Every structure is written in structure tokens, then in C-alpha cells.
Amino acid sequence: MVLQSTRWLALSYFTYFFSYGIYLPFWSVWLKGEGLEPDVIGILLGAGLVARFLGSLLIAPRVKDPANLVTALRILALLTLAFAVGFCFGNAWGWLMLVIAGFNLFFSPLVPLTDALAGTWQKQITLDYGRVRLWGSLAFVIGSALTGQLVAVWGHHAILYCLLASLLAMLLGMLLKPTVMPQGETRVQNQPQRSWRELLTEGPVWRFLLCVTLLQGAHAGYYSFASIYWQEAGYSAAAIGYFWSLGVVAEVIIFASSSLLFRRWNARNLLLLSACCGVARWGLMGATTDLGWLLLVQILHCGTFTVCHLAAMRFISARSGPDVIRLQAVYSGLALGGGIAVMTVIAGFLFEHWQGGVFWVMAALVLPALFIRPPAVSVAR
């Protein structure tokens, strides 16, 4: 069966983030339901984070030719499903350590490689990245909400069954044939590929990577401690759930209208907007918990996350073919993985001692991004 390329890409985002919407909020619940102690759960989830970081940095760059992206995605989807099935065969911590590491190792590269495919197709066909990517955001909300309802009825076993079903749907969707296959760029014979050192020490590249790592890393305090902070301020669990949903709704709206709003914006200007939103958002979170301001704080999620991600896609898609895949891998590994993981550890210490003051630190973390943004025009040497 053949599927239009933009729909193929939207389906890939939808099924991946539907699966992630099951795994991220509920996997600790499944582990607890299997009888594991909190300290063991922490070790297992930590091993998964390390594997995610390694998967993005080590596996994704192995795909050097954009023409091989669809095949690579299919193989990774199959391996991810195979390791997920492994959760059915035992709950000993050693076995779970092996399975959770393997699962995350192959699950994590799917995002940078799918984004690399989007960047490749943007050069071949008419593709509005924002309108395609918004299906991932919607899927995360649907996946987490649906799984929560099923867990309430059938218990923690529903989590694994939902995860397996969604991963199978992801694999089957990727096995469909897109109408336009990605094409690699013709390289001059015997032209050596630039080393990682040459790429990462290029001025615009290291400025870009440092900038997005700061902007995305500043979300660590929010992802880890916002719910606790708001709960201690007197908000109910239902209200906190609405706060989080508002942020995702704002994210979806910006993804849907990104072509209209930011058609003439370059990556440098988008990063400036994201940094300004970050200073405002995290500063407000540290200053007040009043309802009106919290609504604004959550609406600003479309600036701190979505605009930053759009800037990253614009910067990376302007590069040459091999650089696109490698930069997607580093962006995913550093900005969306390692940077947030490191800042989460620091945020935990800060929140324990300063409570809401952690968000002032997150605002300060964003400030350097105002000055280190890459030039408006970034061309590979």
C-alpha cells in the first residue's frame, strides 16, 4: 500500500508519540505494579535515560545517506517492538535492565531520524513541517489520557498491552510505502566526509547546539517539579492536569500555524523569540503562582519549546545531506536528552533548598542564549 509522503510522516510522528505518551508517564507505574521497589525503579529508569542518550548519538549518525532513512526507521521500529515484547517474559531486575536499555537504545533514534527525513523531504516536496509535527503533540496527549483511563479499569497490565499495540501500529505504518522516497545528495567522487570535530567546532554549529541545549535544558525544572510546586501552592490534581494540557494546546496551535507566522523568520530570530519567552516564562514561574499568571506561563510553552524546536529544524534542514542526519542526532542527544537530564539532577537539588527559586535559575540559564545565537545565514564550509 502506498501513502502520500506527508501523511506517511504524520503517521510516523503520531504512532511514535502515542507510544511515548504511554511510556513516559506510566512506565514507573508499570514497574511498581510488577512489585519493584522505588530505588530499583529509579535505577531502571536511569538506565533507560542513558540508553536514550547513547541511541541518539551513536545509532542515528550511522545512517549517512538520506536515501536509507525509511529503511533505517523500519529496522529500528522492529527492534523496538522486539525489546518491548521482552517485558512479557519476566520481571527480575536484571532482565528488566537489559530489556529497558535495549528498548530505549532503539526507540530514541526514531525521533532524530524522522526529523531528518522531514528535513530531506522539505527539499524535495512541499512540506509544512509544523502541520505534520503537530500530530505528534496530539498523539502524546491522546496516548497518555487513554492509557490513564484503561489503567483505572484494568490495572497496570493495561500499560504494557497499550505500549505493544502502539509500537506494532508504528511498525505497520512505517512498512507502508511513501509516494516519494527520500533522495541522497550526489557527492563528488573521493570527496572526504568532514569529521565530527570539524563539524562541531564550526562556529554556527557549536553556537546553535549550545543555544538550543540551554533553551531546552531550562525546561528541566518545569518537567520535574512544576506539578509538585503547584500542588504545594494549593492547586488540585485536576487543575494541574489542565495547566499541562494548556501548554500542549498552545504547542499544537503554533505547529499548525508555523508556516503562516514564521515563513520569513530565520533560525537566529526564532531562537531570540524562544529565549525571550524563556526569560519571561521561568521568571514568572519563580515569582508567582496566581492563576492568571500561570495561564500565561503555560501559553508561553509554545515559545519556550515549540519555537525553539522550529528554529532547530530550520537550522538543520538548511545543511547538506550528511550533516542533516548527524546534527539531528546531536540535537536530540544533547538538547532533548543529555542537557535536560543533567539539569534535572541540578534542579532536584535546587528545588529541595529553594523551592520556586529553581525557576529563577532556569531563567538565568536562558540568558546566554540571547548572545550566542548562530548567524542569520549558516552555510557549511
Image (cartoon, rainbow, N blue to C red):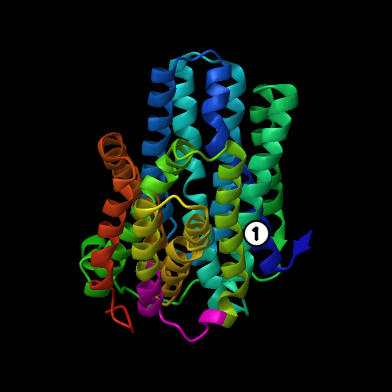
Q: Would residue 223 appear left or right of 1 to someone viewing this image? A: left
Camera-side residue of 160 and 349: 349
Q: Would residue 356 appear left or right of 70 to someone viewing this image? A: left
Question: Three-letter amino acid code at disc 1?
Answer: Trp
Residue 38 versus residue 365 in the image, above or below = above
Q: Would residue 77 appear left or right of 47 to someone viewing this image? A: right
What residue lies at 42% left-to-right and 77% top-to-bottom? 318
The secondary structure that dominates the magenta segment is helix
**Circle 1: element type:** helix
Q: Quadrant of the C terminus?
A: bottom left
Q: Which residue is mark 1?
A: 135
Label 1 crowd (10 A; few <14 / some 14-19 / many >=20): many
Q: Would residue 259 appear left or right of 63 to someone viewing this image? A: right
Instruction: Return the x and y of residue 379 as percentages of the image width and height.
Output: 32, 81
What residue lies at 50% left-to-right and 38% top-to-bottom? 234
Instruction: Return the x and y of residue 21 as percentages of the image width and height.
Output: 59, 43
Residue 85 versus residue 75 in the image, above or below = above
Residue 47, picture quadrant: top left
Q: Quadrant of the N terminus?
A: bottom right
Instruction: Return the x and y of residue 38 as percentages of the image width and height.
Output: 43, 19
Camera-side residue of 332 and 27: 27
Q: Is residue 194 visible?
A: no
* 262 inside magenta stretch: yes
Instruction: Return the x and y of residue 301 as percentages of the image width and height.
Output: 48, 60
* 157 inside magenta stretch: no
Region rendered in magenta:
261-274
Residue extending farthest right: 1
Residue 37 versus residue 310 in the image, above or below = above
What residue lies at 49% left-to-right and 42% top-to-bottom? 106
